[in-house]
Image (cartoon, rainbow, N blue to C red):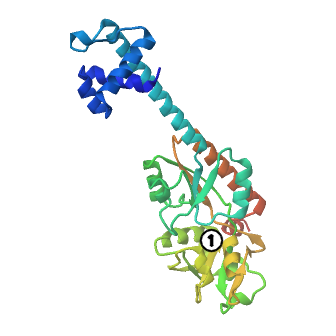
Amino acid sequence: MRTQHLEEFVVFSRHLNFGEAAEELFIAKSTLSTHIAQLEHETGLKLVDRANGNALTPEGAIFLEGAKTALGSLNDTIGRCSRFRQETDRRVRIACSAPTTALASLLSTRIDAPFCFVDCAFGEQPFAALDADRADLAITYSFACLPRLVDEARERGLAFECAKPFPLSIVMMKTHPLATRRRLARPDLAQTTIMTSGVLSYEHDRLLTTNLFGEDLHLAFAPGSMQSFNDLLIVDLGPALLLAPKEAAHRCCAGRGDMALFDDVDGRPFGFPMAVVWRKGANPVVERAAATLHACMKKIECDEGLCDHSAIAQAG
């Protein structure tokens, strides 16, 4: 028994007229009549009383209710199967401006679903990729130090966890007075100017950098105009320093003879706290991916030994 014939019978029951029903179905009147006759033959029931204005017989009325139930159940099942396939087969999209090889490699061995990294605009708001449905998860600079953004996350129904998965480098022109040093100590940074990633991220970068190195250094900040970390290929920092992801900094500055990079301060690597952000109540695949991603970020933080130099100074 073909579901197409059941669907045609349901349409016919609304009209009780072969011509009108056939017109709605975009088939010939004779085709519809033949299909309903086939239904009657297959079921052994007389469904339509053709001698009485094409009215449904009592058996036809009972069969109609069963056909509607069967079609509804079938469509619901197909819908649930389709949603299941989308949830299990669709890649989990992770928005990140500068994913590292270490994170991608570790995540690929631990996550239980296909995933991909998607680009996010440089300096965009932490929730932009989720709001626009460009991503299921987002890795962004931690906004825990900005109460306004924490409140916005809660209002949006977002959850977040923090870690330091990306080592940073301090980048400067070789004309900078600090460029001649073999090593950098925290006091060397006192009263230096730090270039932020962009105008929109000025306050965010200022807070993160101050929390990292301490307020006692009295750092100055200048808004930058970078569109991505690839701008390190051509940017002139002038008298300012820039904190950039170590992997991106070394990749972009490797061919430049006018740049100096420092990966350690006080002999120890360092990194900004990052946040993995996702929507509460997301499907289980995304929920598990968020937990796995955060665990990978914490492992890299531990493996890299990334530290908070402000905390070290206070302890000393």
**Which quadrant holds residue 217?**
bottom right
Please state the total of marks drawn on the protein image.
1
Q: Which residue is found at the position 71% from the left and 52% from the top?
A: 108
Query: In the drawing, does residue 230 fall left or right of residue 257?
Result: left
Residue 306 position in % (x across, y down): 72, 64
Residue 99, x across and y down, in percent: 64, 63
- Give left or right: position of 220 versus 33: right
Q: Look at the picture and state if 311 lies above or below 43.
A: below
Q: Name the amino acid, label 1.
A: Gly
Q: Can you say whether 54 is above or below 234 in the image?
A: above
* Residue at the left extreme of this rendering: 53
The crowd level at tag 1 (other Cα within 10 Å; few <14, some 14-19, many 20+) is: many
- Residue closest to the eye, 232 or 87: 87
Residue 191 in view of the camera: no
Q: Secondary structure at mark 1?
A: loop
Q: Quadrant of residue 142?
A: bottom right
Quadrant occupied by the C terminus: bottom right
x, y percent for residue 5: 40, 23
Please indicate, yes or no, whether residue 134 appears anywhere in the rendered image.
yes
Q: Quadrant of residue 28?
A: top left
Return the residue found at the far front. Answer: 30
Q: What residue lies at 23% left-to-right and 28% top-to-bottom?
A: 20
Front-most of residues 313 and 113: 113
| Rendered view: 126 above or below 31 | below
Q: Residue at x 55, y 36 (%)?
A: 84
- Residue 188 at x, y percent in the picture: 69, 82
Which residue position holds label 1? Answer: 214
Above or below, comparing residue 11 to residue 225 in the picture: above
Farthest residue to the bottom: give it: 175
